[in-house]
Image: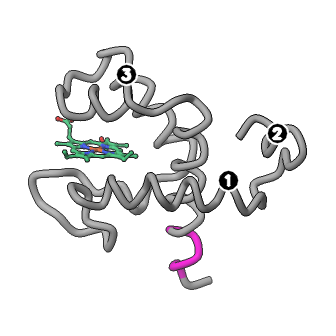
């Protein structure tokens, strides 16, 4: 993972994308990937920075949510970055120009 970051500082590293995709699949069990959902806020439309910021706040317990605190703690910074990038790119890809 570290080597992927060193050699591919841009967001196009395939290993990075598949890691993000894998982790994002675990988010989808609670967050509806189509952006719907009622009790749980959708994350499909958030941009990369917003996701990282929210997750760091959950990790630090600045945003009080036991569930998301546990999720955020389970991800390394690298995993979190890859997941946020994947989710944000997927959202952009679905958007019509
Ligand atoms: C077990 C269910 C569950 C899983 C799995 C889960 N979440 Fe959440 N998530 C929640 C709930 C519930 C909230 C609302 C927390 C609150 O503010 O009370 C939330 C809130 C969020 C928010 C804040 C959204 C906003 O607009 O305020 C983000 C960002 C987020 N989750 C990202 C993720 C990511 C990324 C993953 C996968 C790594 C993930 N979540 C996995 C249940 C889950």
Is 49 in front, or is 75?
75
> Which residue, given by chain and number where applicable, does mark 1 sit on?
16
Of label 2 and label 3, which has the lower sequence position? 2
The reply to whether the magenta stretch includes residue 72 is: no
**Residue under the point 62% across and 83% down:** 97
**Residue under the point 86% across and 38% down:** 6
Q: Indicate if the residue with disc 1 has its beta carbon within 8 Å of ligand 1.
A: no
Give me the C-alpha separation between circle 2 and circle 3: 25 Å
| Magenta region, main secondary structure | helix
Circle 1/circle 2 CB separation < 8 Å: no
Mark 1 surroundings within 10 Å by alpha-carbon count, few (fewer than 14), some (14 through 19), many (20 or more): many
Q: Which of marks 2 and 3 is in front?
A: 2
Q: Name the side, left or right, on which 58 lies relative to 50.
A: left
Residue 94: give x, y in percent of width and height.
Answer: 51, 79
Q: Which of marks 1 and 2 is in front?
A: 2
Marking on residue 3: 2
SS label for mark 3: helix
> Is the residue 90 above or below the residue 74 in the image?
below
Circle 3/circle 1 CB separation < 8 Å: no
SS label for mark 1: helix
Mark 2 surroundings within 10 Å by alpha-carbon count, few (fewer than 14), some (14 through 19), many (20 or more): few
**Residue under the point 25% across and 65% down:** 32
Which contiguous range is marked in magenta? 91-95
> Which residue, given by chain and number where applicable, does mark 3 sit on?
59
* Quarter occupied by residue 36: bottom left
């Amino acid at each position: 993972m570290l080597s992927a970051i060193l050699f591919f500082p841009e967001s196009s590293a395939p290993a990075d994308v598949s890691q993000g995709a894998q982790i994002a699949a675990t988010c989808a069990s609670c967050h509806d990937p189509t952006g719907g959902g009622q009790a749980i806020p959708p994350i499909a439309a958030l941009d990369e920075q917003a996701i990282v910021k929210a997750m760091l706040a959950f990790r630090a317990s600045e945003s009080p949510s036991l569930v998301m605190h546990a999720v955020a703690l389970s991800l390394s910074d690298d995993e979190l970055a890859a997941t946020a990038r994947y989710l944000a790119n997927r959202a952009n890809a679905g958007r019509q120009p």
